[in-house]
Image (tube, rainbow, N blue to C red):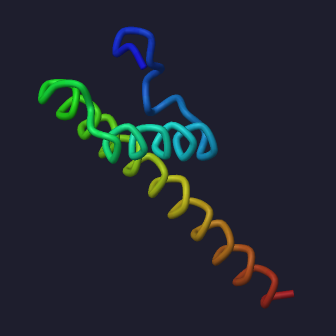
């Protein structure tokens, strides 16, 4: 997972962010090679988790809006 080749987190779909987050967590759990690598992974993981949360909150809002408009019919 070379830092220069990683896509911008803001451009990732929920599934892409989730899958990369799983990879990051696995690498952190196995023990990254250096402290610097661990910090970089942690920061990327935080960004990925925030992106996933954005997607989930957006989905929740869409569902709530659909429920409200469905009740008005």
Image quarter where the C terminus lies is: bottom right
45 left or right of 6 in image? left
Q: Residue at x 68, y 73 (%)?
A: 63
Find residue 3 and report its horizontal and vertical position in percent. 34, 15
Q: Is residue 5 above or below residue 28?
A: above
Image quarter where the N terminus lies is: top left
Q: Is residue 1 above or below residue 24?
A: above
Q: Is residue 25 above or below residue 10?
A: below
* Extreme residue in the bottom direction: 71
Q: Residue at x 47, y 20 (%)?
A: 7
7 left or right of 62 in image? left
* Extreme residue in the top direction: 4
Find residue 23 and report its horizontal and vertical position in percent. 48, 38
Find residue 71 and report its horizontal and vertical position in percent. 79, 90
Find residue 66 and report its horizontal and vertical position in percent. 74, 74
Q: How many marks?
A: 0
Q: Residue at x 31, y 42 (%)?
A: 28
* Extreme residue in the right direction: 73
Q: Residue at x 51, y 37 (%)?
A: 20
């Amino acid at each position: 997972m070379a830092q220069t080749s990683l896509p911008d987190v803001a451009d990732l779909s929920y599934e892409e962010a989730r899958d990369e987050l799983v990879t990051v967590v696995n690498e952190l759990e196995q023990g990254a090679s250096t402290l610097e690598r661990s910090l970089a992974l942690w920061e990327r993981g935080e960004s990925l988790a925030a992106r996933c949360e954005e997607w989930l909150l957006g989905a929740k809002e869409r569902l709530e809006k659909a429920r409200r408009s469905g009740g008005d019919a």
